[in-house]
Image: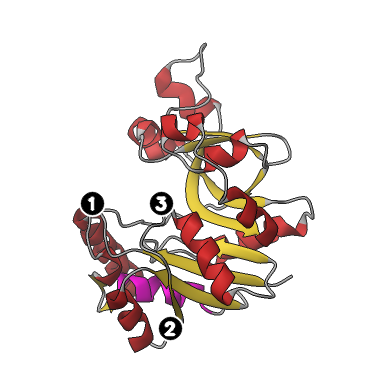
Amino acid sequence: MKFIGIIPARYASTRFPAKPLAILGGKTVIQRVYEQVAGVFDEAYVATDDERIEAAVKAFGGKVVMTSVNHKSGTDRCYEAYTKVGEGYDVVVNIQGDEPFIQLSQLEAVKACFEDETTQIATLVKPFTPEDGWEALENANSPKVVVNKNMNALYFSRSIIPYQRNAEKKDWLKGHVYYKHIGLYAYRVDVLKEITSLPQSSLEVAESLEQLRWLENGYTIKVGTTHVETIGIDTPEDLAKAEQFLQKQQANL
């Protein structure tokens, strides 16, 4: 089975314009993401809609493909990139362009989901621990996932699911394993083609979570597990935290 990694990267962003070109430890964020991914899959490309990002990727020797400015999601951008550079691949892996600390073990965990021939789409979760605390569990920017016994996703929500009716909230993390969604996706190519043609669904609109469109239309999402914490970059404040995280990493080498 052949895997192609695609990293969607837009220049425009309401919370952090030009985020892929922000400097983190002397390199652009997009270069750090690319370097984490290159070599793990059979091929890796950045998919962008901006010539500045294209030039930056070419400057560090990465592979890049230009895509439309009109895409509403990273999944749509991945599919266009696949139609241009993905011939012969079986699975497309969508790696967020703002995850410079994505780890080899996480990428391998998503790949391993396709050892099950029935897997259509795969993603990752990380168990919350009691040490994470209530604030982390309650954070609406950190979607939660519930899974069935086969580790297929039942639902994703910004709310805390499940609600423990007979327990004090302070004890929720002790009495149940909650899963935090890690925004890494992989799709069989035929499934990717199908899901990008689906209209928005009511659940997707309600939660503002694209993956609910797929569940609502009957697709299965296999869930791999990671215990590695990463830092995504959505804001300039996140970049400052990422800089501190990187310095700690380098100090421990």
In this rendering, the label closer to the viewer, 3 or 2: 3
Q: Is residue 57 visible?
A: yes
Disc 2 target residue: 62
x, y percentage for residue 121? 64, 51
Q: Which mark is residue 72?
A: 3
Mark 1 / mark 3, whichever is N-terminal: 1
Q: How crowded is mark 2: few (under 14 residues within 10 Å), some or many (20 or more)?
A: some
x, y percentage for residue 61? 41, 88
Q: On the image, which quarter does residue 231 sit in?
A: bottom left
Mark 3 / mark 2, whichever is N-terminal: 2
Q: Distance between the residues labelled 2 and 1?
A: 26 Å
Q: In this view, does 53 lie above or below 244?
A: below
Quarter in which the N terminus is drawn: bottom right
In this rendering, the label closer to the viewer, 1 or 3: 3
Q: Nearer the viewer, residue 79 or 17?
A: 79
Q: Magenta stretch?
A: 28-38
Q: On the image, which quarter does residue 229 sit in?
A: bottom left
